Every structure is written in structure tokens, then in C-alpha cells.
Image: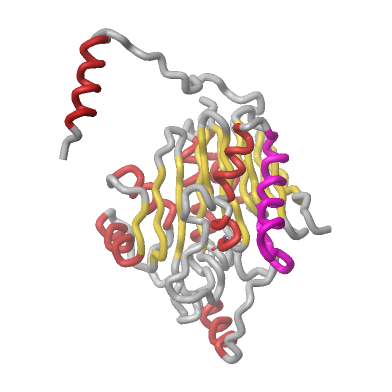
Amino acid sequence: MINRRRFLSVSSLAGLFPTLSFKTVSPTPNEAPAGGPLVISTWKQPKANAAAQAALDRGGSALDAVEAGVRIPEADPEDMSVGYGGRPDRDGRVTLDACIMDEKGNAGSVVFLEHIMHPISVARAVMEKTPHVMLAGEGAYRFALSQGFKKENLLTAKTEKEWREWLKTAKYKPIANIERHDTIGMLSIDAQGNISGACTTSGLAYKMNGRVGDSPIIGAGLFVDNEIGGACATGLGELVMRTCGSFLVVELMRQGRTPQQACEEAALRIVKKQDYKDIQVGFVAVNKKGETGAFSIQPGFNYTITQDKQTKVIDAPSYLK
Ligand code: ASP
């Protein structure tokens, strides 16, 4: 029902200021960052960064770059925590989570998606072609098919063999930095100074069927605010979700922290409130000026930066030494 009082007040205001126009205060696209175009991703991802950089070199936007970048590990069966070849849940099903966010604050996400190799591109289609932000499970899968994505078997011989081995004891405990879970989160700044981000994962190996982590949750696994910067997370999603980790990092940057300080403070928030002893969580962040930061709870987290055509893999500082 229309709220008549509100309608009247809005329309009478419009009558009072018929020609009033407002200047937008958002940063102009030409406010290119000091550091110029840049790509930063969680973990050791030089090939993904190269694909993102190639998209920027073709004149693509930061959004094009992050999508192209994370598609590399999604298609790589040797990367056993993302996309094709990702480790399954305890029922042997590979279920994928991904999200993407652009410089206008638009976002798209898929959760518990099966049989589709590139969840990040489905997330982008959700953002661009539907009125929604997130699609889950069967609905996400049917939407993907409707958009021309192909049904594929994502469980490889290798991951199936490992899973069958795991079933013999079926012990479940996520272990920090043991290659049982990782996420690629990627942020990019394009030549116009616009920021976008992407995040994609098969989640925790041998998770309960139906479990969804932080990676496809806007504000947890990824957050971008083009006025401020962007952040993404990797590690045990339950800890990240409880603190809205990536949103927190961006909000801390808004309050004046550098990306490094913001990542540290967000990780400390987790350490202060949750049982973190054997658990890994890592954040990476970039601000509008192109300054970057990264921090994790446990040692062993690294990240990849591509800037001025040079790619470096850097060990992130950590809370525990
Ligand atoms: N964050 C992911 C999840 O909880 C996994 C990871 O990054 O290791 O699903």
C-alpha cells in the first residue's frame, strides 16, 4: 500500500524545488590511483593475476579483470579448492560458492551451485541479468543452464579417490593451511581508477552437504566500495561470516586505517572473540590510492600482486608467528 503521508511530503518537496539538481559526490572515474592499474589476489595465483592483467591490457574494466582472473583456478583441476577439481562435500558432491561486486556497488552471488565450472561468471550473470543478488542450489543451476552454461562433472578421479579414502575414517576438522580449503579472492583497480572484486571457492573439503561459507556472502568473503577500496577473505568461512570480515576491513579503511592496518584489525577482532587456535583466516585489501595490505591469523598465508606489469607473491604477516 502506498504510504500517503510520505507520498504527499515527497511530492510537495518536489514542487518546492522543481529545478533543483544535485551534483554526485562519488569519485570521478578519472581519479586514477597513484599506483595505477593493479590486481591483488589471495594465495599464490600468478596465472590468475596474469589473466586479469591481460583483461586490463585489452581495455577491460576491473570487473572484467577479476572475472577473467578467477576463471583460471576455477578451470584448473590441480587447484583442489576452487571450481573444477575442487574437493567435494562429505556426500561426494562438489558444491561451489562465488560472488562478484563492481564499482557501482552492484553484486551477484551463487551458493551451493553444482555442475558448473565457472560460478563466478554465473554470479556476474545474476548481477547483470536478474533483479536479485544471490541464487542458490537448484535455482542457480537452472539459471546457469538458461544462460548457456554447460553441465559438467566437477569431481575428478583424483578428488574422488581422496574423498573415498577420507570416508574410511570420515574425521572432520578443518586444518589451517593444509590444502583442504582455500579461496581465490581477487581485487582490481582499472585504468579509470574503478575497483571491483571476485571471490570463488568449493568451500571446505568434506563439509556438511548444504554448507555455505563466507566466500559468496557480500560483506563477508568480499566487499567493494569504490569510494574507499575493497577487501576479500580466505580461510574458515564461519569465523569470517561472524564478523562480516570484508565489510569490516573496508569500513576500517573508511575510518582512516591503511589497508594493512584494516586487515590487521579485522583479524584481531576474530582473535579476540572466537576460538582461532588451529584456524586460518586471511584478508587482503586495497584502497582507492592503490595501497594494499594483507594479514592472517596463522603464518603461511600469501598473496599475489600485479602492478606495473610485475607480479610478486608476498608472505603476509600474521598474528601467530
Ligand atoms: N573461505 C572458504 C569457506 O569457508 C574456504 C577457504 O577460503 O579456505 O568456504
- Residue at 57% x, 31% y is 228
Q: Nearer the viewer, residue 109 or 314?
A: 109
- In the rendering, at what x and y percent does residue 31 appear? 55, 20
- In the rendering, at what x and y percent does residue 156 appear? 49, 75
Picture quadrant of residue 274: bottom right
Q: Residue furthest front?
A: 5
Above-or-below relation of 183 to 85: above
- Residue at 69% x, 42% y is 311
Quarter of the picture holding the N terminus: top left
Quarter of the picture holding the C terminus: bottom right
Based on the picture, tell me whether residue 42 belongs to the magenta stretch.
Answer: no
Above-or-below relation of 304 to 172: above
- Residue at 52% x, 44% y is 223
How many numbered marks appear? 0
Above-or-below relation of 164 to 149: below
Q: Determine if residue 227 is in view.
A: yes
Q: Nearer the viewer, residue 250 or 302?
A: 250
Q: Nearer the viewer, residue 220 or 62?
A: 220
Viewed as shown, does residue 260 lie left or right of 30? right
Q: Residue furthest right?
A: 321
Based on the picture, tell me whether residue 275 belongs to the magenta stretch.
Answer: yes
- In the rendering, at what x and y percent does residue 55 appear? 50, 39
Q: Residue furthest bottom?
A: 168
Task: Find ligand 1 in the image and state its quadrant.
Answer: bottom right
- In the rendering, at what x and y percent does residue 172 appear? 60, 80
Q: Determine if residue 29 is in view.
A: no
| Segment tinted magenta in the rendering | 257-282
Viewed as shown, does residue 164 lie left or right of 296? left
